[in-house]
Image (cartoon, helix red, strand yellow):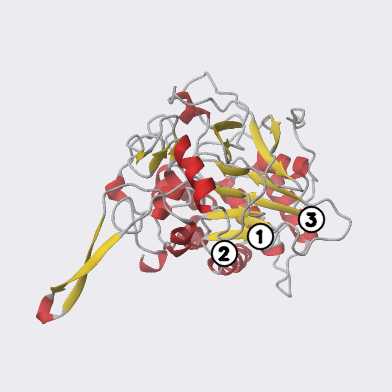
Amino acid sequence: MSPENSPPAAESVSSHPKIPISWPPDGSLTREWIDDLTAALEWSSRNLLPSELPTVLPFDVLHRLVLTASNILHQEPNCIQINPFAGHEAGGEVRVVVVGDVHGQLHDVLFLLRDAGFPSENCTFVFNGDYVDRGAWGLETFLLLLAWKVFLPNRVFLLRGNHESKYCTSVYGFEKEVMTKFGNQGQQVYRKCLRCFEGLPLATIIANCVYTAHGGLFRTVPVIPSKRLKGKKGRKKESSTVSSSLKLGSLEELCRARRTVLDPPWEGSNLIPGDVLWSDPSSSMGLSPNEERGIGLLWGPDCSENFLSKYQLKPGILCPFKQLIIRSHEGPDARDKRHDMKGIQDGYTIDHEVDSGKLITLFSAPDYPQFQATDARYNNRGAYIVLQPPDFATPEFHTFEAARPRPEVNAYYDFKEVIDSDEELDLESMDHSSVASI
């Protein structure tokens, strides 16, 4: 493990950033534009009221950024195959940085980017989701990462987390944050973000040997041949029944799943997105419903071995090295309640070690959650993983402390009363339609 990194008490920010940010005349983002956006967002978080964000990032600029990024994301497959060597610059050190949950902790994300080295033609970034909610700067964090995606679409990959959904953002703060910051235009901004969330891919496979996703593994959803039933006015309609038996799903099934839903379904035939976003590993063998959450699965070491060995991470290509599953989804609060699993105080744990490789949980939000109802804090560190040749499957862990002091700001949700997302949810209030229908 690399030495622990501690960010400075407060990063120096230009007292006069280039504001307001304007959209490039030719629509092409540059590294200089992203640097200006970064400086402006960091400065505004420390010097302006949340409602003054539009004076730094006007609505029309936000609209163009989100629309451009959304168009890119919606064209990507559910599971992205990443070749770290494709298009790299000769002579440069090729590497991949994997990042876990960040939950709107903008200043920790800024430190992580500076510490890991910014995305480039030789440095690919994979973010495992949960950019928003709980932290006070979810909008700024998400927009900054979208800018990096637009600038380097083949080097920055943004996956969907369970909090990139209509239900979670209405409960854990992001919706209210957007409304507070953009006022009368807040509803438009929120809808644009929801549309963008729908386009976020579900998983990546890095160098044929590393599978990453927010929650993890998923079930197969076999469908019994449909029966022809008569509907109104004698019209025939299809009816299908989903088998209740639980078996591990394949990459081919993952690629066919429909991800463009506001809230991934917890019942019906489109269960794979919900599994990928909400499932958790277990110390017990087998595959079972995730009863604590009410959605997704629990999977044991035998399932990790089965997934890595049986399906291989690229059909037809055998990986000569040990393989990895890197997932996120659980912070110190979630693991504190699961006494059969390791804690995540250092930002990562190795949950399963099997013949074919390892299962790692990665969490990149230090001192999480930002707002707590008790004086006692978890004081956890965050972490990111660096993967390098020749195998890209030997993880190098980098841990870091929270950036302090954080600017003083109010929470956008009732953190004293709201239910934890690792407990059973109000599933009936979830919306399984697309943003186009609301």
Indicate which disc, 3 or 1, sits on the residue closer to the N terminus: 3
Rendered image quadrant of residue 273: bottom left
Instruction: Please indicate, yes or no, whether residue 295 appears anywhere in the rendered image.
Output: yes
Say which element carries label 3.
loop
Any mark on residue 149, and which? 1
Observer-side mark, 2 or 3, equals 3
Cβ atoms at labels 2 and 1 below 8 Å apart: yes
Task: Look at label 3 and name its amino acid.
Answer: Asn
Q: CA distance from mark 3 to mark 1?
A: 15 Å
The answer to whether 56 is drawn above or below residue 290 in the figure is: below
Q: Is residue 419 found left or right of 353 in the rendered image?
A: left
Q: Is residue 114 found left or right of 167 in the rendered image?
A: right
User: Residue 6, position in %: x, y?
Assistant: 75, 29
Question: What residue did someone put label 3 on?
Answer: 122
* Residue at 48% across, 21% down: 374
Any mark on residue 349, and which? none
Say which element carries label 2.
helix
